[in-house]
Image (cartoon, rainbow, N blue to C red):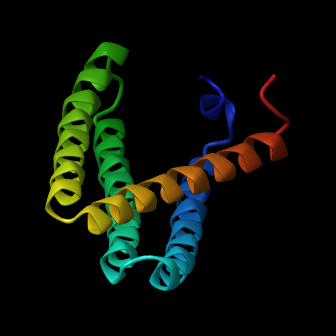
Amino acid sequence: MLVLENLPTDTLPRLLRRTTLSAIIVGVVGFVVTIFVAPLLAALGVVIGVGMAIANLRFLDGQTAKVEMRGEQSTKAVRRQLGGRTTARLALMTVVVIAAVFLNAPLGIGIVSGLVLYQLVFVVNVMRVVTSQGGMG
């Protein structure tokens, strides 16, 4: 999975910005569509899910910037620094989603849908960048 490492250094910030803007647009469209086909709380869940995914990305970006500012470190040390906080953050998000599903199914399913929409947008944007930079091989 060294594809992103081989891209120019200015590519990742542009990718993250494009992904965030695309996710907001897709989230708004998802919200509007969901209002017409599901309970209102499901539509709210889509917005919450996209928001959680964007917040997760921002936290990860901030963590990565802090690690990069510390200079040369071993790969193991970097993984340990990023991995622990990332795991905790994702575990918290998982607990929130599961609790929402049990407390109010439409809201919980909406949150899951928002998270999925974000991931789809992210994958599409990564594929666009990779193909525009000359592919994977």
User: Which of these two is toward me, 83 or 91?
Assistant: 91
Residue at image point 77% right, 28% down: 136
User: Which of these two is toward me, 110 or 78?
Assistant: 110
Total numbered labels placed on residues in the image:
0
- 7 versus 110 height, above or below: above
- Left or right side of 102 for 68: right
Residue at image point 74% right, 40% down: 130
Q: Could you tell me residue 125's position as x and y percent?
A: 66, 53
- Left or right side of 43 for 37: right
- 39 versus 130 height, above or below: below
Residue at image point 36% right, 17% down: 75
Q: Could you tell me residue 90's position as x and y percent?
A: 26, 42
- Left or right side of 28 for 48: left
Work out which quarter of the rendered image holds the C terminus and state it: top right
Residue at image point 60% right, 30% down: 5
Q: Could you tell me residue 23's position as x and y percent?
A: 53, 66
Work out which quarter of the rendered image holds the N terminus and state it: top right
Kindly indicate the quadrant of the structure image that contains residue 15: bottom right
Q: Could you tell me residue 8's position as x and y percent?
A: 68, 41
